[in-house]
Image (spheres, rainbow, N blue to C red):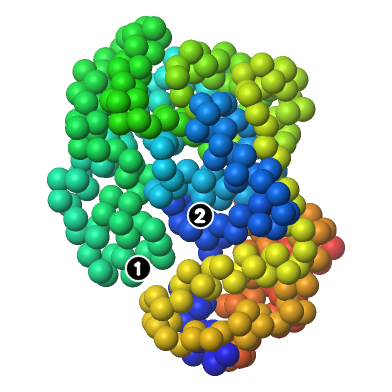
């Protein structure tokens, strides 16, 4: 590997640990391919098509969003993914009314997004945009709303535009009316609750158990799949565990990355996705991972993973090590760059204790 190339990889943040939702799926290395069975992506894909409600269980930074985006991203067939944001609900997340508001808001947002693209804000599809994004987003309207046809988007916009304070059953009816054109397009609506990890920091057990209980329960009456990213800790939250069991048809545990080799594949995928993009044009021809990161460096990263760092943290270490290596003009990332990166992120080390 050459110095300028390592520098370009650093400049494009090739090991970005927080890609946007759609890019997560593009960079995803299927857990099924690592563990050798169909317990994750294949199972998620088939349960949503069957209209089931699924919990994706893992700690923060372990691949829940990545798996959801891979399975339900813009190229997924037969599904209409609706990404519901719970972040603004805070304590109200236990209330069905609030969740219904969130569902309506996301339907409205995605319809607007799709209409804008379909109306020919095709600028999104210009070559420059395409190359800047890594990904499948290159498709016109290739965002999460690409399943939305013009007429469906219009109907949803009509439904949701009349929105004013109304009781829960009227909200539910409004949601049902939005789903009708989706059914007519032969798609299974999938409500995705992916940003639930935030409660690990702030929320009390009533919020968590309420969300998994009353908050979500009414969704079972709709003909729709539901995918809920579920922090492992929530299962132990009093009240939440039983509520989950009642509401959900299937549980998918995100497995651990089984070996340094597989961690290497995750790094490799990120470089691969950037190949030929953003100044790295052509330079990476015939490259191998060992030309960028030594196997000792990957082993070091895996040691961190084994000792409790999440995948997200491991990628952060990898990025910092890359910047470090590029800064000092190295030709590849070595074990010592990783060790430096880990120490830079380690507050204990900085504090001197
Ligand atoms: N199977 C995977 N293949 C490639 N990257 C992954 C995989 N699983 C996780 N990642 C990466 O690790 C980071 C954390 O994953 P994420 O899905 O956001 O975790 P969670 O949603 O569980 O908090 C992201 O940068 C993501 O791209
Ligand atoms: Mg997530």
Neighbour tally class for label 1: few under 14, some 14-19, many 20 plus, Cα within 10 Å: few
The label shown at residue 190 is none
Per the model, the C-alpha gap separating discs 2 and 1 is 15 Å
Taking depth in this image into account, of 93 and 42 the one nearest to the observer is 42
Considering every residue shown, the one lying at the far left of the view is 119
Q: Secondary structure at mark 1?
A: helix
Residue 147 in the image: state x and y as whole percent: 33, 41
Taking depth in this image into account, of 308 and 116 the one nearest to the observer is 116
Q: Compared with residue 80, is residue 76 higher up or lower down, i.e. above or below? A: below
**Measuring 39% from the left and 21% from the top, which residue is drawn there?**
101
Asked if residue 276 lies left or right of residue 159, the reply is right
Q: Which residue does the numbered mark 1 point to in the structure image? A: 132
Residue 210 in the image: state x and y as whole percent: 61, 17
Residue 287 in the image: state x and y as whole percent: 56, 84
Q: Is mark 2 within 8 Å of ligand 1?
A: yes
Quadrant location, the N terminus: bottom right
First in residue order: circle 2 vs circle 1: 2
Q: Compared with residue 236, is residue 351 higher up or lower down, i.e. above or below? A: below
Q: Compared with residue 346, is residue 335 higher up or lower down, i.e. above or below? A: below
The label shown at residue 24 is 2
**Measuring 31% from the left and 21% from the top, which residue is drawn there?**
180
Residue 22 in the image: state x and y as whole percent: 44, 52
Quadrant of the rendered structure where residue 110 is?
top left
Q: Secondary structure at mark 2?
A: helix
Neighbour tally class for label 2: few under 14, some 14-19, many 20 plus, Cα within 10 Å: many
> Can residue 344 be seen by looking at this rendering?
no
> Can residue 164 be seen by looking at this rendering?
yes
**Measuring 20% from the left and 37% from the top, which residue is drawn there?**
150
Q: Compared with residue 348, is residue 39 higher up or lower down, i.e. above or below? A: above
């Amino acid at each position: 590997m050459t110095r300028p190339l390592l520098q370009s990889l650093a400049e494009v943040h090739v090991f970005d640990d927080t890609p946007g939702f759609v890019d997560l799926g593009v960079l995803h290395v299927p857990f099924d391919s690592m563990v050798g069975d169909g317990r994750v992506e294949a199972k998620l894909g088939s349960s949503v098509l069957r209209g089931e409600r699924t919990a994706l269980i893992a700690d923060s930074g372990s691949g829940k969003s990545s798996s959801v985006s891979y399975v339900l991203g813009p190229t997924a067939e037969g599904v209409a993914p609706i990404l519901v944001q719970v972040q603004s609900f805070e304590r109200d997340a236990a209330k069905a009314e609030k969740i219904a508001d969130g569902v309506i808001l996301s339907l409205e947002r995605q319809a607007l997004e799709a209409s804008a693209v379909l109306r020919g804000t095709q600028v999104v599809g210009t070559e420059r945009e395409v190359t800047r994004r890594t990904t499948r987003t290159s498709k016109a309207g290739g965002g999460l709303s690409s399943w939305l046809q013009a007429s469906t988007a219009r109907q949803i916009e009509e439904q949701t535009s009349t929105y004013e304070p109304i009781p829960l059953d009227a909200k539910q009816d409004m949601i049902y009316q939005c789903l009708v054109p989706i059914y007519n397009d032969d798609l299974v609506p999938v409500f995705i609750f992916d940003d639930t990890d935030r409660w690990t920091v702030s929320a009390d057990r009533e919020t968590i158990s309420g969300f998994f209980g009353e908050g979500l329960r009414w969704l079972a009456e709709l003909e729709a799949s539901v995918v809920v990213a579920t922090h492992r800790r929530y299962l132990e939250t009093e009240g939440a565990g039983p509520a989950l069991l009642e509401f959900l048809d299937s549980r998918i545990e995100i497995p651990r990355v089984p070996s340094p080799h597989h961690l290497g594949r995750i790094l490799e995928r990120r470089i691969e996705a950037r190949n030929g993009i953003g100044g790295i044009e052509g330079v990476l021809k015939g490259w191998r991972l060992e030309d960028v990161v030594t196997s000792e460096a990957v082993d070091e990263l895996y040691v961190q993973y084994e000792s409790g760092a999440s995948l997200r943290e491991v990628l952060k270490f990898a990025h910092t090590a890359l910047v470090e290596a590029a800064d000092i003009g190295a030709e590849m990332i070595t074990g010592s760059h990783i060790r430096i990166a880990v120490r830079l992120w380690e507050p204990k080390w900085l504090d001197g204790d």
